[in-house]
Image (tube, rainbow, N blue to C red):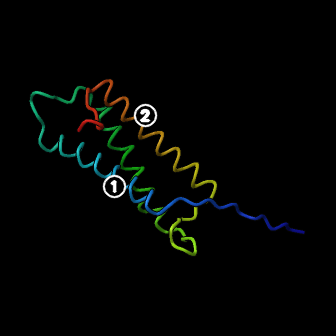
Amino acid sequence: MATKMKQEHFGIKVSTLLCAADQVSSDLDYLCLVTEKPDEEFPIKDAIIYAGAIIALSNQLEFILEELSENDLSPDEEYVKLSRDEVFSLNRYTDASEEAITLLEEICGISLKSN
């Protein structure tokens, strides 16, 4: 006899996701602008670290905009429903981006907080 497992759902405010997507997009736009119009006074010291930051932010943004945008909303449409796995995935993408941004600042001297 099969037992039906109840899937646990969590909610995150739509406005929180939109704000996060906006911030990640802004950071990504800045990093792309630096590569399109480099400043000779501020060369990119480590291309691997720089590329890692772009990849981490791109992955995070894609997850938010592509994966989570397909999820159901709460009846009042204020929250996006997330599974436990999606909460963990969102956390992993956020952690990876934060780690990449920290390395970018420490090694390349580029701070997204001040730019």
Q: CA distance from mark 1 to mark 2?
A: 19 Å
Amino acid on which the number 2 mark rests in the picture: Glu
The residue closer to the viewer here, 55 or 12, is: 12
Q: Is residue 72 left or right of residue 42?
A: right
Amino acid on which the number 1 mark rests in the picture: Asp
Q: Position of residue 6 (x, y in %)?
A: 75, 65
Q: Position of residue 57 (x, y in %)?
A: 37, 46
Residue drawn at the location 30% of the way across and 37% of the way down? 113
Vertical relation: 59 (above or below) 78: above
Q: Is residue 31 left or right of residue 93?
A: left
The quadrant of the image that shows the C terminus is: top left
Number of marks in the image?
2
- Report which residue position mark 1 lands on: 22
Outermost residue to the left: 40
Task: For mark 2, give the secondary structure.
Answer: helix
- How crowded pointer 1 is (Cα within 10 Å; few <14, some 14-19, many 20+) is rated as few
Vertical relation: 38 (above or below) 57: above
Q: Position of residue 7 (x, y in %)?
A: 71, 63
Residue drawn at the location 22% of the way across and 46% of the way down? 32
The residue closer to the viewer here, 73 or 7, is: 73
The residue closer to the viewer here, 107 or 22, is: 22
Q: Position of residue 31 (x, y in %)?
A: 24, 42
User: Residue 42 sits in which quadrant?
Assistant: top left
- Report which residue position mark 2 lands on: 99
Vertical relation: 6 (above or below) 92: below
Residue drawn at the location 54% of the way across and 71% of the way down? 73
- How crowded pointer 2 is (Cα within 10 Å; few <14, some 14-19, many 20+) is rated as some
The quadrant of the image that shows the N terminus is: bottom right
Residue drawn at the location 23% of the way across and 26% of the way down? 45
Mark toward the start of the polypeptide (1 vs 2): 1
Task: For mark 1, give the secondary structure.
Answer: helix
